[in-house]
Image: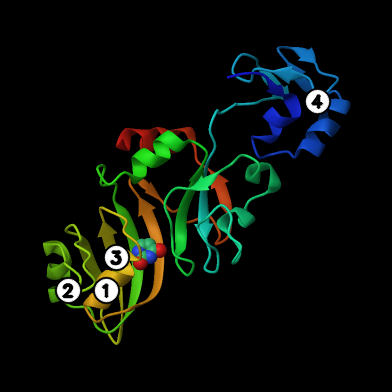
């Protein structure tokens, strides 16, 4: 890792903007290897130095991993002329870090979406060879039955030509509108909606609640993000 400007290094943690870092530096609150720094433009290799901001040690991470609780109405893309993207939900400091969504959720699908700038791990998690489970909460129009569960478990071939790996459909409630937990080992375009539509029970609401060993944080409000912890990132690495 080469040298970077100090304000860029500190702002990349997402806690302070570059303007705030300049302010902290001018208040003599930033130390690098024990020395008070007088210019936020000074360059350092963040992996080779110890940075303290206001007495707090900065735990520098080469890559950023963020969990977003995606609301409906946002596209899982980095830019799109047609509308708001999930990046619009992140502060400027994070938007500058070239984060991208790890896989896609449809515009109207809510819930767990990871964003990162660590391409290698992201692509490994998405690789069709890895079969990382994705778990969804779905509400459908129509009564779900055990026959639907068996069809999912058997690996469905859809009328539109899509062949699906065996999947798990767990009925949470069955009625005119039903609720289910769906676990897929792959992530084809609109897959949950297509599979349930094939069974004549179209999805009226969809939320991703888990990806591999990582669950959507129940404390995270819709539309908000938080950084993944070291343990969560290590657990993701263990999947691949
Ligand atoms: N399956 C869908 O149909 N939509 C999603 O957003 C994710 C999985």
User: How far apart are the alpha carbons under marks 1 and 2?
Assistant: 8 Å
Rounded to the nearest angstrom, the CA distance separating label 3 from label 2 is 12 Å
Residues 141 and 218: in front is: 141
C-alpha separation, residue under disc 2 versus residue under disc 4? 60 Å
Which quarter of the picture shows residue 169?
bottom left
* Among the two numbered marks 3 and 1 on one chain, the one whose residue lies closer to the N terminus: 3
Reading the image, the residue beneath label 3 is 181
* Quadrant containing ligand 1: bottom left
Disc nearer the start of the sequence (1/4): 4
Mark positioned earlier in the residue sequence (4 or 3): 4
The disc label shown at residue 40, or none: 4
The residue where tag 2 is placed is 148
Q: Position of residue 95 (x, y in %)?
A: 64, 46
Q: Are marks 1 and 2 in contact (CB under 8 Å)?
A: yes
Helix, strand or loop for disc 1: helix
Q: Is mark 3 within 8 Å of ligand 1?
A: no
Q: CA distance from mark 3 to mark 1?
A: 12 Å
Classify residue 27 as left or right of residue 64. Answer: right
Pointer 2 with pointer 4, Cβ within 8 A: no
Query: Earlier along the polypeptide chain: callout 2 or callout 4?
Result: 4
Above or below: residue 95 compared with residue 239: below
- Report the residue marked by disc 1: 196
């Amino acid at each position: 890792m080469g040298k970077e400007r100090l304000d860029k290094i500190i702002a990349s943690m997402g806690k302070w903007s570059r303007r705030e870092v300049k302010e902290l530096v001018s208040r003599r609150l930033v130390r690098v290897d024990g020395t008070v720094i007088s210019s936020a433009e000074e360059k350092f290799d963040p992996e080779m130095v110890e940075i303290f901001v206001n007495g707090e040690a900065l735990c520098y991470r080469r890559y950023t991993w963020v969990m977003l609780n995606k609301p409906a109405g946002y596209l899982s893309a980095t830019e799109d002329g047609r509308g708001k993207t999930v990046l619009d939900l992140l502060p400027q400091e994070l938007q500058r870090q070239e984060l991208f969504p790890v896989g896609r959720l449809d515009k109207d699908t809510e819930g767990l979406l990871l964003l990162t700038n660590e391409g290698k791990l992201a692509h490994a998690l998405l690789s069709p060879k890895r079969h990382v489970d994705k778990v969804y909460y779905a509400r459908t129009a129509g009564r779900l039955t055990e026959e639907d569960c068996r069809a999912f478990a058997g690996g469905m071939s859809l009328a539109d030509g899509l062949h699906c790996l065996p999947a798990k459909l767990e009925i949470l409630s069955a009625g005119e509108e039903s609720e289910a937990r769906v676990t897929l080992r792959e992530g084809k375009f609109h897959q949950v909606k297509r599979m349930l539509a094939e069974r004549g029970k179209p999805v009226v609401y969809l939320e991703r609640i888990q990806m591999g060993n990582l669950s959507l944080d129940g404390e995270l409000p819709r539309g908000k993000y938080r950084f993944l912890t070291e343990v969560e990132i290590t657990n993701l690495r263990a999947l691949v």
